């Protein structure tokens, strides 16, 4: 199948200005871009009239949680997986309708959900998963309060694993079942009940073991980390991707650049929890921790970019807060502008996940595409407004957008 996107201007995933179309697609891949593209047509072609609109790559959310059916960590883990998987399918379908053609799930997912997506059982972004994130006892992924006596230490989204040997076994099991990468918790978190935000988690030997196993598999490790102490602890022991990083400072950003580590900010979730946390039953301690990182997140993105860190884009939205997914683009653009934000959500995230053929409009790239009104390089609301009209293609096939505003 050959498709020509005619009368379009193009954000190619990297350039700081829109480029001239058209764009020619054949068998799910981009063949040619620019004024000469139409000359490359050989045989029958479907012509899409862009009517002067902007064509851009499908977005990539590098911090997604398909299994996060609630803001309550205990509820997330004790719900039957059959129920969680049905909710996950709906969450994934709505993400695709917003224009996210690829997501990286960094605390959840499994071979069954991935197989259902591959078989086309429901609409979904391309789905890369880590399986349950790894947490030390009393770490961010341990949902138990101090007065709760239970052995709830492993579930759909997180698993409590201590010690080098058990961590190696857990990492190997995740790769055996198709994990894209490994997720570890290396600092406290907002919604976990007993761990301070700043203190590093896991020992050096434990992190080295996890990173070693991932590297030998040709993969990498992503770490939940907020504070400079936790980020330094992570990147100096083999971590490739820092998730959140809200309390980042200049010396730590320079260290990240030295080690080639990515930052994946998740600004949408803090703003959403600030607005809705009380009504959704977030405990006072969690709301206080959220307040500490809320304003710092945008500053961290600025600091990282000035230091030369590769900055991606993620959302980290749980439960009903998933409707805020596009607002993360606006929040990140407020800090560093639309161009850097669009790069983060397309080509930078593509490099992070090891798929340079995604997140770009260039010959050879996968034809994950979105057509919108307006110029998102000058007004991010052309893309970030959930009610803005959009058309979406995945591997050159048009996708439904009926729920884009939800």
Image: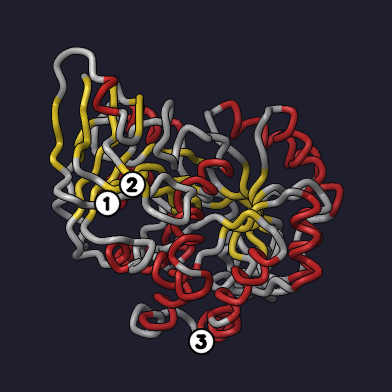
Which residue is label 3 attached to? Answer: 284
- Residue 54's tag is 1
Residue at (62, 31) in percent of width and height: 173
Residue 58 is left or right of residue 371, and the answer is: right
Q: How far is the residue under mark 1 from the one under mark 3?
A: 44 Å
Which comes sooner in the sequence, label 2 or label 3? 2
Q: How far is the residue under mark 1 from the one under mark 2?
A: 6 Å
Residue 213 seen in the current view: yes
Q: Can you name the residue that lies furthest to the top here?
A: 43
Which residue is label 2 attached to? Answer: 10
Kindly check if marks 1 and 2 are in contact, taking CB atoms under 8 A apart as contact. yes
Q: Is residue 83 above or below residue 71?
A: above
Q: Tell me residue 148's x, y (percent).
A: 58, 70
SS assignment at label 1 = strand
Q: How far is the residue under mark 2 from the one under mark 3?
A: 46 Å
Which one is in front, 373 or 273?
Answer: 373
Which one is in front, 115 or 15?
Answer: 15
Kindly check if marks 1 and 3 are in contact, taking CB atoms under 8 A apart as contact. no
């Amino acid at each position: 199948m050959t498709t020509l996107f005619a009368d379009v201007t193009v954000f190619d995933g990297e350039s700081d200005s829109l480029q001239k179309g058209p764009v020619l697609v054949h068998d799910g891949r981009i063949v040619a871009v620019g004024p000469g593209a139409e000359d490359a047509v050989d045989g029958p072609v479907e012509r899409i009239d862009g009517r002067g609109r902007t064509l851009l790559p499908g977005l990539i959310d590098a911090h997604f949680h398909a299994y996060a059916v609630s803001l309550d960590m205990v509820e997330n883990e004790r719900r039957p997986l059959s129920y969680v998987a049905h909710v996950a399918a709906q969450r994934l379908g709505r993400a695709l309708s917003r224009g996210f053609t690829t997501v990286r799930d960094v605390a959840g997912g499994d071979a069954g959900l991935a197989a259902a997506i591959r078989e086309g059982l429901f609409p979904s972004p391309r789905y890369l998963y880590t399986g349950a994130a790894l947490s030390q006892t009393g770490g961010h992924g341990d949902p138990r309060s101090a007065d709760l006596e239970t052995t709830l230490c492993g579930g759909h989204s997180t698993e409590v694993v201590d010690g080098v040997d058990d961590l190696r076994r857990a990492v190997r099991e995740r790769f055996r079942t198709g994990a894209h990468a490994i997720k570890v918790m290396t600092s406290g978190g907002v919604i976990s009940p007993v761990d301070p935000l700043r203190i590093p988690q896991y020992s050096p030997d434990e992190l080295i073991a996890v990173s070693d196993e991932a590297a030998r598999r040709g993969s990498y490790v992503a770490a939940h980390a907020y504070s400079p102490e936790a980020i330094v602890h992570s990147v100096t022991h083999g971590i490739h991707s820092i998730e959140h990083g809200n309390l980042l400072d200049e010396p730590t950003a320079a260290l990240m650049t030295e080690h080639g580590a990515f930052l994946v900010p998740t600004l949408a979730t803090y703003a959403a929890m600030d607005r809705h946390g009380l009504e959704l039953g977030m405990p006072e301690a969690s709301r206080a921790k959220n307040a500490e990182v809320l304003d710092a997140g945008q500053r961290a993105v600025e600091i990282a970019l000035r230091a030369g860190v590769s900055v991606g884009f993620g959302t980290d939205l749980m439960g009903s807060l998933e409707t805020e997914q596009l607002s993360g683009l606006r929040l990140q653009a407020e800090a560093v502008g639309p161009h850097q934000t669009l790069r983060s959500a397309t080509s930078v995230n593509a490099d992070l996940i090891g798929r340079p053929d995604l997140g770009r409009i260039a010959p050879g790239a996968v034809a994950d595409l979105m057509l919108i009104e307006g110029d998102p390089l000058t007004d991010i609301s052309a893309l970030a407004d959930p009610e803005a009209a959009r058309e979406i293609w995945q591997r050159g096939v048009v996708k439904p957008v009926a729920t884009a505003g939800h």
